[in-house]
Image (tube, grey):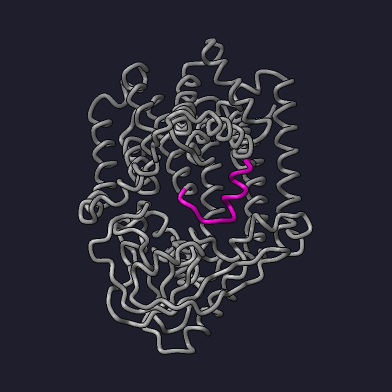
Amino acid sequence: MTTPRTYRNRLVLVLAGLLTIRLIGLFVAPWGLHGDEAQYWAWSQDLDFGYFSKPPMIAWVIASTTSIFGNEEWAVRLAAPFLHIATSWMIFLTGLKIFEARIGFWAALIYTLMPAVWLSSFIISTDATLLLFWVTALHAWACLREHPTWPRAVQLGLAIGLGLLSKYAMAFFTPVLVLAVLFDAPTRKALLGPKGGVAGLIAVACLAPNLMWNAANNFATISHTAENANLQQDLFNPMEVLTFWIDQLGVFGIVVFPMLILAIIATFKSKLSTPAKWLAGFAMLPLLAITLEALLSRANANWAVTAYGAAPILVALWAIESKKRMTWLKGGLAVQTAVVLFVGLAATTTAGVDALGLDNAVKRLRAWPETAKAVEIKAAEKDYDFIATDNRLVFYDLEHYGVGETPLRMWRLNATPKHHADLTKTLPQGDGKILLVSYYESFADYFREDFEVITPIETLEINLGPKKTRRLYLYEASGYSITEREDRT
């Protein structure tokens, strides 16, 4: 008989092995920072309680690693694999608490072998911390249903609060929790009283500094999150919905995602236990909400990532009821892991990526030191007051890799800020001489509107691999003014 201790020990060995593989890959991969990662790194150099597009947790996490190990790419990303391994462990503990060790074991494997988790273990993103706090909140709820205690109430409040400081998508947790309080007797007994009140107060207290930062900055993060909805006049986009759902096969797994849908259907047929129905609720709400978002506008594949905190437990519960289902689950995990390991091994070298024809997928991670150096050399040719660029991702990559002593600033396309560099590093108006580094060839007319003098210099061309080139259009400019200008987009 396989005991809970056996499953625990097996999982420790698996997670330790995966962590080792992912750390090795992190250290040897030759890829530079993506612009978003460079942006988060820049935030970590100026710690605050909020930033234009995200709450502050990602900056705090990066600061915790780079303050010790420096600013190399691997140091910026170092927390990611540890965060996902910790999430896997919390999923195991949650499955163990609600059901049994075997379900917790398979749920943890489903999560840690997700294609999206493999990818996310090699980059630094807000999803890594979000998912850890989401699952920690789920674990607190599971414990409170069984035996309400003050430590678990505190855990719930902290997990929700810190999750909101990671990404506002943590809010998807609360509607299902509220419904559980209303309609699930064990949850109602645990949280409809002082413990629930304290958990709520703790969550609000965690989020309060970020809300105050938003209030002092025209509610930048909240407004940006709302603008992501991007509702258009055409409010019916079925192809966006189809694309979003196909993308979930790549996020959760080409076999495991259909198994999730079947497991959710089984809950409606009352074939699974009451806790399983709430797990289905925690998984369904993000998927349905983002499906609606896709229908009305657009949706990125990872916007429903919080579904995959509860989903692995639900899939494991459903799968172990049948040998056939377990065969499909094991086969699906084996195949996707083999594919990921093959592609991942190739991705540790530029030659491997080029050989597989994946150069387009990594072009934004290539040659940023060379790009920054080329800009620095050009800036040194004349006594420029500022280097300015028109693209957020270019700005942050240049900032991370350095362009010498000339201050780097952000030229605004719009009168109102659209991202953090617009808000904090905007190009000052005046007669200063500026080296303008443009990502967009089509912006020349905008530059003529904003500068008294604008002279094209040359086009930088940086080799990014087979048939891939980064082109940056250089201008010398002066007399910058945006008085009474309206937003252009």
Q: Give the residue displayed 24% in from the left and 45% down from the top.
A: 205
Taking the image as shown, residue 365 lies to the left or right of residue 333, namely: left
- Where residue 421 appears, as percent x and y from the top left, is 37, 64
Foreground pick, 87 / 431: 431
Taking the image as shown, residue 457 lies to the left or right of residue 323, namely: left
- Where residue 299 appears, as percent x and y from the top left, is 49, 38
Q: Name the image quarter holding residue 479.
A: bottom left
Taking the image as shown, residue 429 lies to the left or right of residue 439, namely: left
Height in image: 38 above or below 408? Answer: above
Height in image: 235 above or below 454? Answer: above
Quadrant where the image shows the N terminus = top right
Height in image: 41 above or below 177? Answer: below
Foreground pick, 369 / 148: 369
Foreground pick, 484 / 324: 484
Q: Give the residue displayed 30% in from the left and 35% down from the top.
A: 150
Q: Hey, which residue is sitting farthest right in the picture? A: 355
Q: Name the image quarter holding residue 483.
A: bottom left
Q: Name the image quarter holding residue 468.
A: bottom right
- Where residue 128 appears, as percent x and y from the top left, is 49, 48
Q: Give the residue displayed 55% in from the left and 36% down from the top.
A: 92
Residue 440 is a magenta residue: no
**Can you see residue 282?**
no
Range of the magenta residues? 114-126
- Where residue 77 appears, as percent x and y from the top left, is 53, 60
The total of numbered circles placed on residues is 0
**Can you see residue 226?**
yes
